[in-house]
């Protein structure tokens, strides 16, 4: 009789694990699709200048970026604070305490150059 309970509990555990894994995969795909859509939208706003440089619309650069965290990782949002601009592999816990507090409160960065300088400074 005890083996039936053990087998039942094991089956329930495996079912719960499979459901959690499926939920994680679905949420990850959703985030990645949103990020890809944002990247496509940004790529559509580029134009070629006379010198051959890619020039972005001024509107996107003037709005700035917000740095926050999602699932323990540093994430960059557009100025609306809901659209993900870039997900990084920088763990929030790997940063100095002061920077962790700034990011937890939402750190605003006005230009793309400042954003990438900040990210480069704290990436491993």
Image: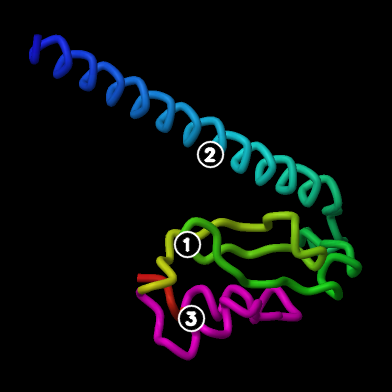
For the C terminus, the quadrant is bottom left
Labels 1 and 2: the sequence-earlier one: 2
Residue 9, by quadrant, is top left
Q: Is residue 36 magenta?
A: no
Q: Label 1 to label 2, Cα distance in Å?
A: 13 Å
- Give the magenta range: 94-120
- Is residue 108 one of those drawn in magenta? yes
> To which residue does mark 1 refer?
73
Q: Is residue 72 above or below residue 103?
A: above
Q: In the displayed image of the protein, which residue is found farthest to the bottom?
A: 98
Specify whether 67 is left or right of 2: right
> For mark 3, what is the residue?
100
Q: Contact (CB < 8 A) between labels 1 and 3?
A: no
Q: Secondary structure at mark 2?
A: helix
Residue in the image at 65% along x and 77% along y: 106
Quadrant in the picture for residue 56 = bottom right
Circles 1 and 2 in contact, beta carbons < 8 Å? no
- The x and y percentages for residue 16 are 37, 27
Tell me the residue that label 2 is attached to.
Answer: 28
């Amino acid at each position: 009789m005890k083996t039936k309970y053990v087998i039942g509990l094991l089956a329930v555990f495996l079912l719960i694990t499979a459901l959690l894994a499926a939920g994680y995969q679905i949420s990850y795909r959703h985030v990645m699709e949103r990020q890809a859509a944002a990247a496509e939208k940004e790529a559509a706003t580029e134009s070629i200048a006379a010198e051959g440089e890619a020039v972005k619309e001024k509107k996107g650069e003037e709005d700035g970026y917000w740095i926050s965290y999602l699932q323990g990782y540093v994430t960059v949002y557009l100025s609306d604070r809901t659209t993900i601009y870039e997900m990084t592999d920088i763990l929030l816990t790997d940063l100095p305490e002061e920077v962790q507090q700034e990011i937890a409160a939402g750190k605003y960065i006005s230009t793309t150059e400042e954003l990438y300088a900040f990210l480069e400074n704290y990436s491993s």
